[in-house]
Image: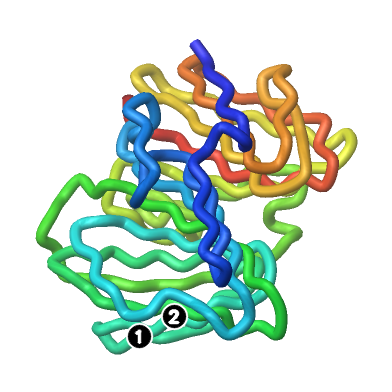
């Protein structure tokens, strides 16, 4: 079973300083058919104008992954960590018992990024933060594991039985992912285009799949995130 979710069908919010597309119900966007997918609760595609950003706000009991596509994002939080996230960087923040943080555009132009929320298996843990860079050559023509519950292959830690992969695909480059029984996959195209299990996807499109295997091919400047999730 598979289901295509087109970019234009997502929720949209435009605030001048922020343009945001919501793959799942978020803030003022509510769609009972799109409340999440397994523990994957949020994929927001955000574009923040120069000199703008999210002021200090609170989270708890959520795994928050930030993936920057363009520009730079400055992060500061209440557990004493701070950094600038640039393309190629992946940041993971486990909100746990509670954390407050801010995110601001640190670039000279637009900052374009994805913010992903995954519900944790355990609640009430101490807040955590980490960030790692994954070079383009690690993702070129393959699916590079960037987050997992066991830090496998140098991935970031998330407190959920979920795995996130990132890949870059052009022309004849091709990759596949086998999903174990009782698992399901979610493919989100961050930019460019490619085919997933024979279906054409463009920027912002996504495919939900419980077919057991995901095949990615025929990319055109494609950057993609793939989620292996518990059913």
Horizontal and vertical percent position of residue 130: 40, 72
The disc placed on residue 112 is none
Cα distance in 3D space between marks 2 and 1: 8 Å
Please report whichever mark, 2 or 1, sits nearer to the chain's N-terminal start.
2
Q: Residue at x 33, y 48 (%)?
A: 118
Q: Residue at x 35, y 38 (%)?
A: 30
Residue 197 image-quadrant placement: top right
Horizontal and vertical percent position of residue 227: 48, 39
Q: In the rendered image, which residue does mark 2 sit on?
A: 75
- Examine the rendered structure and indicate whether residue 228 appears above or below residue 121: above
Residue 80 image-quadrant placement: bottom left
Residue 102 image-quadrant placement: bottom left
Horizontal and vertical percent position of residue 188: 58, 39
Left or right of 30, for residue 4: right
Secondary structure at numbered mark 2? strand
Depth check: give the residue in front, 30 or 36: 30
Depth check: give the residue in front, 170 or 7: 7
Q: In the rendered image, which residue does mark 1 sit on?
A: 81
* Tally of numbered tags: 2
Contact between labelled residues 1 and 2, with CB atoms less than 8 Å apart? yes
Secondary structure at numbered mark 1? loop
Q: Residue at x 43, y 25 (%)?
A: 184
Left or right of 150, for residue 190: right
Q: Residue furthest top?
A: 1
- Examine the rendered structure and indicate whether residue 69 appears above or below residue 56: above
Left or right of 198, for residue 80: left
Horizontal and vertical percent position of residue 25: 37, 40
């Amino acid at each position: 079973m598979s289901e295509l979710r087109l970019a234009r069908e997502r929720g949209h919010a435009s605030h001048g300083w922020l343009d945001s597309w919501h793959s799942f119900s978020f803030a003022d966007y509510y769609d009972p058919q799109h409340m999440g997918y397994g523990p994957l609760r949020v994929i927001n595609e955000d574009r923040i104008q120069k000199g703008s950003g999210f002021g200090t706000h609170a989270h708890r009991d959520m795994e928050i992954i930030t993936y920057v596509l363009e520009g730079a994002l400055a992060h500061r939080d209440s557990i004493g960590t701070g950094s600038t996230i640039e393309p190629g960087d992946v940041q993971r923040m486990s909100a746990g018992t509670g954390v407050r943080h801010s995110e601001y555009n640190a670039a000279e132009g637009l900052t374009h990024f994805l913010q992903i929320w995954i519900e944790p298996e355990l609640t009430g843990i101490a807040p955590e933060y980490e960030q790692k860079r994954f070079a383009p050559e690690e993702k070129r023509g393959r699916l590079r594991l960037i987050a997992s519950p066991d830090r496998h292959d140098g991935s970031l830690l998330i407190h959920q039985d979920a795995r996130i992969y990132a890949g870059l695909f052009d022309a004849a480059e091709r990759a596949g992912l086998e999903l174990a029984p009782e698992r399901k996959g979610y493919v989100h195209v961050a930019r460019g285009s490619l085919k997933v299990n024979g279906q054409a996807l463009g920027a912002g499109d996504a495919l939900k799949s419980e077919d057991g295997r995901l095949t990615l091919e025929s990319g055109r400047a494609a950057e993609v995130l793939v989620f292996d999730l518990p059913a």
